[in-house]
Amino acid sequence: MRICLYGSGSPDIDEIYTDEAYRLGSEIAKRGHSLVFGGGDTGMMGACAKGVRDNDGKSLGIAPPWIGNFEPLCDDCSEFIYVDSMDERKNKFVENSDAFIISPGGIGTLDEFFEIITLKKLKQHDKEIIVFNISGFFDTMLKMIDEMSEKGFLYKQEHIFKVAYSIEEIFEILE
């Protein structure tokens, strides 16, 4: 299975998050899956990719070359696809992935998350989407989504995405 990870590339993230990302990458590789990610060498992306690499797994990085002006790109992926734009990058994520894990991140991660759930709602794909809620990182966002639904701003949200609080839960959902 090709598992896409959305998550921050910031080097300033607390180890509570990056340690879990590394463990997730290790588990992806040990279970014979491959990682698809934004190609960053730091933060959640870098930690997960290192976990995959350290366990002899395969990874596909996807990014425009100019993103290297903002964060270092991973130079030891199994494969790297360079694209021209962030839109093309997100399209390549969808084309090259069987499932999506949303890990802690910033605005870019939220953009990717909301686009992928919107596409699923609009029946443009039927791939599993899992929010990896490490240490309650996404609690406020999940509460906001629930409130939007309660107030009638969202269509029924059943089966659009699932929430996991551990790596074990992620693989219970995926496998």
Image (cartoon, rainbow, N blue to C red):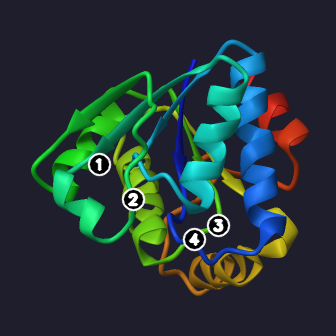
Residue 23, position as x, y percentages in the image: 81, 42
| Marks 4,2: beta carbons within 8 A | no
Q: CA distance from mark 4 to mark 2?
A: 10 Å
Can you identify the residue that label 2 sits on?
72
Rendering coords of residue 2 (x, y %): 52, 23
Quarter-of-image position of residue 146: bottom right
Rendering coords of residue 73 (x, y %): 37, 51
Labels 3 and 4: the sequence-earlier one: 4
**Quadrant in the picture for residue 103:** bottom right
Q: Which residue is mark 3?
A: 104
Task: Tell whether 50 sits left or right of 115.
Answer: right
Q: Nearer the viewer, mark 4 or mark 1?
A: 4
Which residue type does callout 3 highlight? Pro
Q: Which residue is mark 4?
A: 11
Mark 4 or mark 2, which has the lower sequence index? 4
Q: Which residue is the site of mark 1?
A: 90
In what element is the residue under mark 4? loop
Q: Secondary structure at mark 1?
A: helix
Q: Is residue 169 above or below residue 108?
A: above
Q: CA distance from mark 3 to mark 4?
A: 13 Å
Query: Which residue: 19% across, 39% down?
Result: 82
Disc 2 secondary structure class? loop
Question: Cα distance, mark 2 to mark 3?
Answer: 18 Å
What amino acid is at disc 1?
Lys
Mark nearer the viewer, 2 or 3: 2
Q: Nearer the viewer, residue 128 or 3?
A: 3
Of the residues shown, which amino acid type is indicated by label 2? Pro
Quarter placement of the N terminus: top right
For image coordinates 77% across by 77% down, the residue present is 139
CA distance for labels 3 and 1: 18 Å
Q: Quadrant of the C terminus?
A: top right
